Amino acid sequence: MKSGILAAAAVALSIGAAGTAHAGQTLDAIKQKGFIQCGVNTGLAGFSNPDSSGNWTGLDVDVCRAVAVALFNDPAKVKFTPLSAQQRFPAIQSGEVDILSRNTTWTLTRDTSVGLNFAPVTYYDGQGFMVSKKLGVKSAKELNGATVCVQSGTTTELNLADYFRATNMQYNPVVIESVDEVNAAFFAGRCDVLTTDASGLAGTRAAVAPNPADYVILPEIISKEPLAPAVRHGDDQWYDLVTWTVYAMIDAEENGITSKNIDEFMNSKNPSIQRLLGVSPGMGKSLGVDEKWAYNVIKKVGNYGEVFDRNVGPNTALKLERGLNALWTKGGLQYAMPLR
Amino acid sequence: MTSESGGAGRGAHSGFTLSINDPTVRAVVFQVLIIGAVVLLGWWLVHNTLDNLARRSIATGFGFLEREASFGIGESMIDYHPRDSYGRAFLVGVLNTLKVSVIGIIVATVIGTLVGIARLSSNWLLAKLASLYVEVVRNVPPLLQLFVWYAVITESMPSVREAFNPLPGVFLSQRGIKIPVPESDPVWNWMIVALLVGVAAAIAMTRWARARQARTGQPFPVGLASLGLIFGMPLLTWLVGGAPTAMDVPRVQGFNFVGGATMSPEFFAILFGLSIYTAGFIAEVVRSGIVAVNWGQTEAARSLGLSSGNTLRLVVLPQALRVIVPPLTSQYLNLTKNSSLALAIGYPDLVSIANTTINQTGQSIEGVAMIMGTYLTISLGISLFMNWYNKRIALVER
């Protein structure tokens, strides 16, 4: 339970003891050690969760695997560090992990004073409320006086306070560090309401609830939670690689390229597809990786839509619709910058 | 020339040459070198940290304490609202830590003393039960005990709408214990004043009685008279103030109880978890203290004609306390520091609130420094008080 403090103390020591930093240090170090150290959630169904045989799975996990493929052409060249909400920033600041892909909301403070650079959003989320059906609550506006279970050290805690202030309602927070303990307290009945990102609520209901049908997620979404992978300040080349790996996966979906049909596109006459797949070279050289980087990512990990469907889509336990995460051409927000 | 001036001359002589062979010079030189090295290392660490933080554009300094906290806190002894500053939120955490520490120390001392005496009891069952208690609570990690207490409350208690109602106005539920409290009235403030006056009067009276007994040998019923003063003064004030009896009784409204006073499940779990854990250690401290007083002391006191109460109070306890107080201080410090485990079960202590602050502001070094500084201050405070008390009760050898 003291791990947050330990991590913070460790960052104090390591920042204190670290020698001079120079640009490009992160990518150089990754190439030298031969794998990427990726910070993920300690366990969030659909995003980062070890399966029954101990392999990490999930959307956040696949982002790290995609970057590993872009750099090393091998999805196994990544090691995962499970991090609590408190541990994540000290871990990325101190260099314990190279990339933080841990359902982390992109905010101004984190971009600036925490010292992070955010890659493109991999999941547009929003904070919601889950209640027991027995309460008969239909809307978050009826929650005046409720006791709310919330995990400490997240933007969730702030949005919760903001929402109840804005709607002029009272609430009583129960703030617990570990997500497992938060869920246990909620399902035991200590709180009326559980709040976190809507995707997380769906995951918790599917995986933890004694009987998922007894719980209902209220329609109100009270915040914007753009979840994005992040790297620390100081290595722009590494940041570019992470950024464009995500864009490549979205771009592939825009062009209808999947892991199954990608080889048919190798003969495509479309110049933007030729650039993406490295048929006409240049993009890989600019990023400092193999020209086949995007081809490898799509072939071995999949395009954005495939990753979404595999981990959190309608056919998984989470049963999440694409919603805001649909492509911009289909009414969503996912939009890849041009690869040229 | 006496040998004395010769000695002075020798000292002055070696002082002038500053020989490294002179043990005094050598000692000073080494101390200066070591202090210099420590200061240099500290300066290097601080400087390098600040330098690297600045290079990575990570904010530093304590300016964040004045910014709006924007997060809610479940229970607070002072008025707190999310629009208040991080500094005030931290203060709420410090007060919550102090609350659980102070009450916990009192509860642990009471339980620990009773169990420690019970272990020495001639009653076989009582002594064995006390031993069992000590062995169990001392050998299970405190964090697990807290989880057990918290789970017991949240899992076994009924929901709010089916709350258990053992006494009129008292409710037990998953939301904690709700009790009725008197409605606010100026008389209650005056009663607190009266209580303080009563305590002061009792102390003064005890001194007077002691002086009189030393002078004339006449004892005075100090105990009864003190009780009368301490409880009688507030009672009198209450009667004079019109004897208000209106109560603020808790009742279910919406999701939860409103009115009355609450002991939250989190506070209950941390308080009793820590008290019962620490009491196991205190019991052993008390037992060792009593056993350390030679049985001959008791026999001697009895043969002087002292009653068994006076034997305990005047002969055994003063000697036992000498042995008890120093290790007791360590247990008090342990309880205070263990209160940081509150984080795990959702009690908003200072570590919990500082952690949230660190996470929102990203200023982990400042936050951890504040946590460390606060615990250090509280612990040194307890140490100072206990050392003062220890000195007070130490045997004065004549």
Image: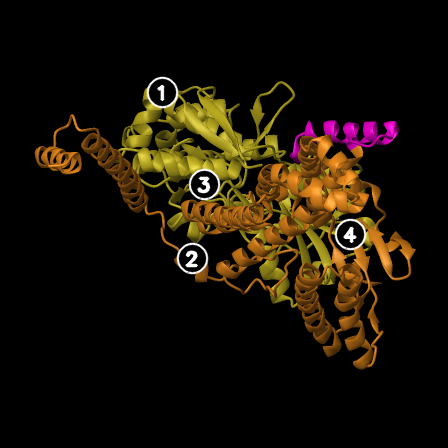
Chain colours: A yellow, B orange
* Element under disc 1: helix
Answer whether residue A153 is visible to the viewer in this image: no
Report the mark closest to the observer, 2 or 3. 2
On the image, numbered disc 4 is attached to which residue?
B176
Report the mark closest to the observer, 4 or 3. 4
* Element under disc 4: strand
* Element under disc 3: helix
Q: How far apart are marks 1 and 3 (CA)?
A: 22 Å
Which amino acid type is marked by label 1?
Lys
Q: Distance between the residues labelled 4 and 1?
A: 53 Å
Q: Is residue B129 magenta?
A: yes
On the image, numbered disc 3 is attached to which residue?
A89
Which amino acid type is marked by label 3?
Phe
The numbered disc on residue B92 is none
Answer whether residue A159 is visible to the viewer in this image: yes
The numbered disc on residue A33 is 1
Which amino acid type is marked by label 2?
Phe
Q: Nearer the viewer, residue B143 or A259?
A: B143
A335 lies above or below A82: below
B361 lies above or below B323: below
